[in-house]
Image (spheres, rainbow, N blue to C red):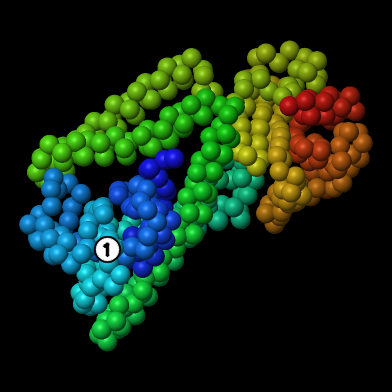
Amino acid sequence: MKDTLKKVEFFTFYDKTGIEAHLEKMAAEGWLLEKMSAFRWTYHRIEPKKIHFSVSYYATITDFEPEPTEQQQAFNEFCEHSGWKLATQTVQMQVFYNENDDPVPIETDPALEVENIHRSVKKTVLVTYFLMMFCGFILGASFISTLLGDPIHLLSSPIKLFTGAWCIVAFAYSLPELITYFVWRKKAKTMAEQGVFLETRGHRKLGFAIAVFMLVSVVLYLISLANTGLQFYMTAYVLIFLAGFPLVNGVKSFLKKKKVKAGSNKALTFVASFTLAFVLVGAVTFVTILGLASGVFENAPNELPFTIGELLNVDDSTYLRSHSNDESILLGQYRSSQHPNTYDHSPTMQYTITEVKMPFLYDFVADTLYHHYDEWKGWNSTYEYVETDATAWGANKAWELYRNGESDNAFLICYDKYILEISVDWELTAEQKQLIREKVNSN
């Protein structure tokens, strides 16, 4: 039987009421808090009993002090005489517990208690919430604008898809936290004038849901890079980010144990974090440079799905060719083109294959591609897709693009999983269309 329990908790920093109620519940189950950080709390086993808890806020405390200040020591001694024992503390938050049946409260002045909470919140989470809300709103609005204007390009780009979602989530988390806090503070100040402390209310479930979403989305983002060397690159940076916090905190804790003064501790910890980041990022960058030099980080294959040479049975080795792709867990877009490197009348070709990985998106993607040329109406040329024989392509649906009433030798072809947009400058034969079908569906 384990005597130590470590849990990830998602309480809002100022949720005094919620934290105290949770710790009382844990004590009734036989677990007493002994250590806490931003999210991970450590408990040790005790005999299940009813224990009262009190969370106090002390805005002048810093996380770099090697030992309690005189004021803090005096406060702790006062609490000790009143039967309140210090369980643990983290930055400006101190947690006391009392095993008496009806203990005298530590805080007896509601107005002072509300003000202490506000001073501590200003020094810890308020700036973070405001930055998250501002950045989340600006970048999230940009994400939504792009989603409405060019949804397929966005949904097939892992970095744009996930960063946009993360920004929206940051906004969705910080806004209710800020609203809840300031509404509570306004009411709490009014209640404090009547000698009553207003209970706090946090968003523990929201915090947990967002943490799960972030974890899952990061994993999915790395999976979406599976076919590229970028997976190594991004995984390395995620690991650096995750490892950086405990390493820097380890330096800070070591200096505190050595009784280094708060100012010196802060400066040395900053130097250590900067040096660590420089070394780790430098190492990853060095490996990346080697990978780029060797071609490991190519994010698209050099071979085109099909070529002019295959379709026309000609030598296209001198042609200029390009191929790029974007691939997320939702969609993949593979863009290819071939052009002669001379100014003769050799044939040209360009096409985009869109892979729909989630069936529920298929109709949306097909409809979006079908209406791609709608915005071109009103220009000197008028474009219109006209349905054509899909059996010639071995497809489910097929459209041919007409410009000013004449065929433009461009087609939109819908297969089971892939949607092809292709433009050539010659008339495709039945054999070429079947070869294209085979090549597209063999990807």
Q: Position of residue 398 (x, y in %)?
A: 85, 41
Identify the image quadrant of residue 198: bottom left
Q: Amino acid at mark 1?
A: Asn
Q: Quadrant of the N terminus?
A: top left
Above or below, 204 relative to 349: below
Q: Residue at x 22, y 63 (%)?
A: 84
Q: Is residue 164 left or right of residue 21?
A: right
Residue 176 spot, x, y in % from top left = 44, 66
Residue 53 in the image: above or below residue 291: below
10 Å crowding of disc 1: few (<14), some (14-19), many (20+): many
Who is closer to the viewer here, 68 or 299? 68
Q: Nearer the viewer, residue 353 or 360?
A: 360
Q: Quadrant of residue 332?
A: top right
Q: Is residue 24 above or below residue 278?
A: below
Q: Residue 197: tell me if it is visible.
A: yes
Q: Position of residue 99 (x, y in %)?
A: 29, 63
Percent of width and height locating residue 273:
25, 36
Quarter of the image that includes the C terminus: top right
- Residue that numbered label 1 is attached to: 98
| Callout 1: SS | strand
In the displayed structure, does residue 99 sit left or right of residue 335?
Answer: left
Quadrant of the image occupied by residue 5: top left
Give the residue drawn at x 22%, y 35%.
Answer: 251
